[in-house]
Image: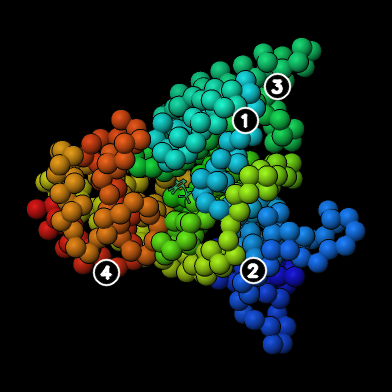
Amino acid sequence: MTSSESAASRPELAPDTIVVETGRPNRADGASVNPAIDLSSTFISTGDIESSPFAYARFDTPAWSHFEEALAKLEHAELPGLVFGSGLAAISAVISAVPAGGTLIIPTHSYQGALASAAQIAERQGFELVTVDIADTAAVTAALDAAAEKGSAASAPGSGADRPAAGGSESGTASGLLWIESPTNPMLEVADVPALIAAAKQRGILVAVDNTFATPLLQTPLDLGADIVVHSVTKYLAGHSDVVLGAALTSSGELRQRMHTERSMRGSVAGPFEVWLALRGLRTLAVRLDRAQANAQTIAERLAAHPAVIETRYPGLPDDPGHDRAAAQMNGFGAIIAFTVDTADRATSIAEAVKLWTPATSLGGVESLIERRRRHPEEPQTVPEGLIRLSVGIENVDDLWTDLEAALG
Ligand SMILES: *Cc1c(COP(=O)(O)O)cnc(C)c1O
């Protein structure tokens, strides 16, 4: 038994309290304040193995339970989350649900690992991959229309042309999946998340949202009708660049079962210590994000005014193309900034010249990271050569700016 049961009698708590209080052992005299790291690979079970809460640690283990429960509470999922060995493992488990002949609609500027994995699974499984500008609601709606039409044409005759045959979260047999990332990586485009989810639902198309950039503190897509939320826990949730971990959340028993089976069958499981570290990191998510966002706002404003910078993308800038949407649908603007300088060489030299910022890929840790994205050969060609992505951390903002300004030269 964990804290959710005792919390049930308390008034609803704010998310910045939930990150601290949730996922703890039951309150009892002498009990640990934090869960133990349960390393057992097998558990005592007799008779029907299905009826044992724990039997073998590839299926489920108490090492995951507290964190899975905490994530569900934060993302407003009615069922416990599912941790995976990495964010990409969670993403692959979701994408694998798209059947042959179906359609996956995915943002052109998704996390490149998600794009690469989607392309591979699409080819293997025989479904269509459609990339869209996720900020262009009309374009996404047109892609949804095409996917729904194809789904109904492919369905059994007599299923009724007036009913979306792609199925919904209830049937769990959708032939279409809309993948949403907002803000996108690394272009910081902001999708109209409520409108896109509503449009997909209308057409019986499943929706999954990669909520890594926003975290559940800034947006909770399940509240808007999304079927699945995924996270690279590696980033903000764990928050210290010392864990690789993923998670998926849903309120649908059927979808959860399918992802659970995928996790068990592929063995894409998380280590007990990694999960423990992630829960430890989660405790400070609210204060880390507060500070990182405040720093990001200041740095984005200073970058936007700097003569060497051609463009700064940060939803917190009042004239950013995504500002109004982000202000309407998020509780904050996050702490990732993209800015562009004139050439790839200039961008590379900036990433080499910084002394406080760490030149490294990844994001969401306490330390500030800087990276020219096109150094990754697989990054979409539409990302400018001179684009630098910043993951703003929690250091002193003037120290960060002094270092970056010197590197901008
Ligand atoms: C890093 C990242 C992933 C992949 O997660 P891993 O934990 O590295 O496997 C997926 N989506 C987004 C938005 C990311 O930033």
| Residue furthest bottom in the image | 30
Q: How many marks?
A: 4
Contact (Cβ within 8 Å) of mark 4 with mark 2: no
* One can see residue 56 in this view: yes
Disc assigned to residue 214: none
Whole-angstrom CA distance, mark 3 to mark 2, is 45 Å
First along the sequence among labels 1 and 2: 2
Which element carries disc 4, helix, strand or loop?
loop
Residue 137 on image: x %, y %: 46, 29
Tell which tag, 1 or 2, sits nearer the viewer: 2
Which kind of residue does numbered mark 3 sit on? Answer: Ala
Contact (Cβ within 8 Å) of mark 3 with mark 4: no
Residue shown at 30% from the left, 54% from the top: 360
Residue shown at 34% from the left, 51% from the top: 361
Instruction: Look at mark 1 in the image and give the residue it sits on.
Output: 98
Residue shown at 41% from the left, 61% from the top: 241
In front: 101, or 173? 101
Which kind of residue does numbered mark 2 sit on? Answer: Leu
In front: 131, or 5? 131
